[in-house]
Image: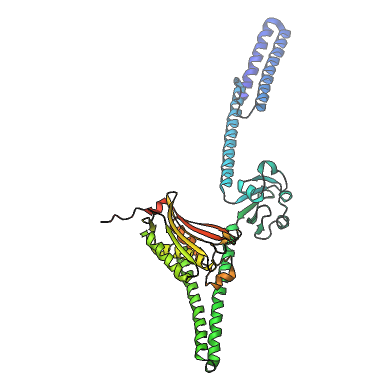
């Protein structure tokens, strides 16, 4: 650059000297001034072009130049290109970071030093009922106004986390944490723990129910035995037999409960019972006969197998299917008053097949239906215990059907009866064996 300036000055001085030789001192001075003005104009023009380039959109090519300015423009162009590439890399990294944040299963809120929302992912929008386009730039505590959340934010997240039950979405429970970063900024992380909370509630209920269900008959057994031990000689033989019979009934109830618990545990463990070709027709014939025996003539029990559907074969476990079908049939007997009707059926439906139990018993209120397959859930607590139910039957049915890719459907009208159906997909059906 300095070499170029020196050469320009030397050329100007030489031109002035030549002008002085031929035109005198005035001509030399005029030539020198004119050359200086031309050089100054040239530099001003390049400075103007440089200023115009700096105001142009990012990525605009730098204008061409000659001489010293060519070197200047070349250096600026190289620096501009490196800066542009760095910005592109940063923008790409930021975009990947945002994509990763959007893909996270947790909600993410980035807050400024004064707790204004700078950015949020889709999960955070769902968790807090926000919209990025509308709510970014606003204080988070003005948008999420639940007292526990506001207090947690004001305390700076001194507690490890906050469990927040959303007032915008019923049944949504969030675990919220605050992570400081940058220059006074904070990141709010929200995780949906609704399912974990439900599972924990179910676990606590399960333990409490098992304890209660076992304690009740055990208390009765102990009471009868203590009565007999304390005054055996005072009771007549028929009274002793009566007390022993009651104790035996309660013991059998405990045994049934334990067997159901073991069955449910085996089903939930996923242990395979093996896959067989189960001929359903003779199976449901046996179930209908068992239902008649359980009813002891108090109900009209019928079985309907559609013409041509008696040879349908299901791939699965005969033992498990018998347990599921028997549970549905025995429930119908337990919850149908004497004189009622119970209808069992087996037929093809929509390419698959369906086993159904229909009764005109007490029916089920709509609010109970979604929870019927929960362990120990009873729509009619008193009647269930009177009839010897453990509260695990439909939970067992649900697990068995799930293992057979089948679904349990419940239709009921309170006071008029119910219909429980197990529907098997076409993939679970097989052709009957060829008779030789």
Which residue appears farthest toward the top when viewing the image?
A: 22
The colour scheme applied to this rendered structure is rainbow
Q: Quadrant of residue 273?
A: bottom left
Q: Is residue 35 left or right of residue 203?
A: right
Pick the quarter of the image with the C terminus: bottom left
Q: Is residue 355 left or right of residue 31?
A: left
What residue is drawn where x is 72% and y is 10%?
30
Nearest the eye: 83 or 294: 294
What residue is drawn where x is 68% and y is 22%?
48
Q: How many marks?
A: 0
Pick the quarter of the image with the N terminus: top right
How far across and down, in percent of the image, does residue 119 sit?
Answer: 65, 44
Which residue appears farthest toward the bottom when viewing the image?
A: 233
Nearest the eye: 389 or 77: 389
Above or below 338: residue 9: above
Nearest the eye: 327 or 22: 327
How far across and down, in percent of the image, does residue 320 sit?
Answer: 42, 63
How far across and down, in percent of the image, does residue 217 sit?
Answer: 54, 78
How far across and down, in percent of the image, does residue 423 sit?
Answer: 46, 55
- Residue 81 visible: yes
Above or below 171: residue 71: above
Above or below 70: residue 353: below
Above or below 78: residue 173: below
- Residue 269 visible: no
Nearest the eye: 212 or 66: 212
């Amino acid at each position: 650059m300095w070499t170029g300036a020196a050469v320009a000055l030397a050329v100007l001085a030489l031109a002035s000297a030549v002008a002085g030789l031929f035109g005198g001192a005035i001509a030399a001075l005029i030539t020198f001034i004119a050359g200086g003005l031309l050089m100054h104009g040239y530099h001003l023009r390049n400075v103007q072009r440089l200023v115009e380039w700096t105001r142009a959109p990012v990525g605009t090519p730098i204008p061409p130049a000659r001489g010293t300015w060519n070197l200047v423009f070349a250096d600026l162009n190289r620096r501009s290109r490196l800066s542009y590439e760095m910005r592109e890399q940063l923008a790409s990294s930021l975009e990947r970071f945002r994509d990763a944040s959007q893909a996270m299963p947790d909600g993410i809120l980035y807050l400024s030093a004064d707790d204004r929302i700078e950015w949020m992912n889709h999960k955070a929008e769902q968790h807090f009922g926000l919209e990025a386009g509308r709510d970014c730039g606003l204080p988070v505590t003005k948008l999420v106004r639940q007292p526990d959340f506001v207090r947690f934010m004001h305390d700076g997240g001194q507690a490890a986390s906050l469990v927040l039950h959303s007032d915008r979405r019923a049944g949504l429970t969030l675990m919220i944490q605050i992570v400081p970063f940058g220059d006074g900024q904070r990141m709010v992380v929200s995780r949906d723990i609704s399912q974990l909370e439900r599972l924990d509630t179910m676990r606590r209920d399960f333990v409490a129910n098992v304890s209660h269900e076992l304690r009740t008959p055990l208390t009765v057994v102990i009471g009868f035995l203590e009565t007999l031990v304390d005054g055996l000689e005072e009771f007549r033989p028929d009274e002793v037999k009566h007390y022993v019979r009651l104790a035996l009934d309660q013991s059998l109830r405990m045994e049934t409960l334990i067997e159901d618990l073991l069955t449910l545990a085996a089903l939930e463990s996923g242990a395979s019972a093996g896959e067989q070709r189960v001929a359903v027709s003779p199976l449901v014939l046996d179930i209908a006969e068992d239902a008649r025996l359980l009813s002891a003539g108090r109900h009209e029990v019928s079985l309907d197998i559609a013409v041509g559907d008696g040879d349908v074969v299901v791939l699965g476990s005969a033992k498990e299917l018998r347990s599921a079908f028997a549970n549905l049939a025995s429930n119908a007997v337990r919850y149908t008053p004497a004189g009622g009707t119970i209808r069992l059926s087996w037929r093809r439906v929509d390419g698959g097949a369906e086993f159904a139990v229909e009764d005109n018993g007490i029916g089920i209120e709509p609010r109970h239906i979604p929870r019927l397959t929960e362990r120990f859930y009873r729509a009619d607590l008193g009647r269930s215990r009177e009839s010897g139910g453990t509260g695990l039957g439909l939970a067992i049915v649900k697990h068995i059907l799930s293992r057979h890719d089948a679904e349990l459907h419940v239709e009921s009208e309170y006071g008029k009866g119910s219909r429980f159906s197990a529907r098997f997909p076409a993939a679970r059906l097989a052709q009957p064996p060829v008779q030789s």
